[in-house]
Image (spheres, rainbow, N blue to C red):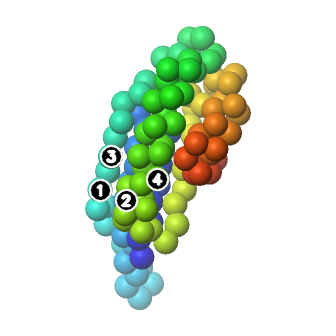
Amino acid sequence: MKFAAIDIGSNAVRLLLARVFENHDESFIKKESLVRIPLRLGDDAFLRKSIPEEKIKKLSNTMLAFKYLMRAYEPLDYMACATSAMREADNSEKIIKEITKFSGLKIGEF
């Protein structure tokens, strides 16, 4: 089974494409590809409590690119999570809505 995971972190946004193999009572994960785009969202989120439009645009474009990579990979499912930089930014709700509208990807927070 193929799965995908997106981590919107403080320093970079990462897409992991992986396969899960089940063997009797055990499951194994094999990483097939990892794409990392350094955006440094934390620089602004932690200092200014807001992520500027320029970085929002880069993040949106990155998420759209990840959507197309996932479409080519054809995972069974995916999960996209925004971590501490997005939690700290006052405009994170707006960013998440914008990304969902632009790329169609749903984002959760952890």
Pointer 2 and pointer 3: residues touching (CB < 8 Å)?
no
Instruction: Tell me the kind of residue under disc 4.
Output: Lys
Mark 4 or mark 1: whose residue is earlier in sequence: 1
Q: Secondary structure at mark 4?
A: helix
Residue at left 36%, top 36%?
A: 37
Residue at left 64%, top 25%?
A: 88
Pointer 4 and pointer 1: residues touching (CB < 8 Å)?
no
89 over 59 or under it: above or below: above
> Which residue is disc 2 drawn over?
17
> Which residue is disc 1 drawn over?
33
Instruction: Tell me the kind of residue under disc 3.
Output: Val
Query: In 3D space, how far apart are the residues under numbered discs 4 and 2 (Cα atoms)?
Result: 12 Å
Q: Secondary structure at mark 3?
A: strand
Q: Position of residue 98 (x, y in %)?
A: 64, 37
Pointer 1 and pointer 3: residues touching (CB < 8 Å)?
yes
Quarter-of-image position of residue 26: bottom left
The one of 29 and 57 positioned closer to us in this rendering: 57
> Which residue is disc 3 drawn over?
35
Numbered marks: total: 4
Pointer 1 and pointer 2: residues touching (CB < 8 Å)?
yes
Mark 4 or mark 2: whose residue is earlier in sequence: 2
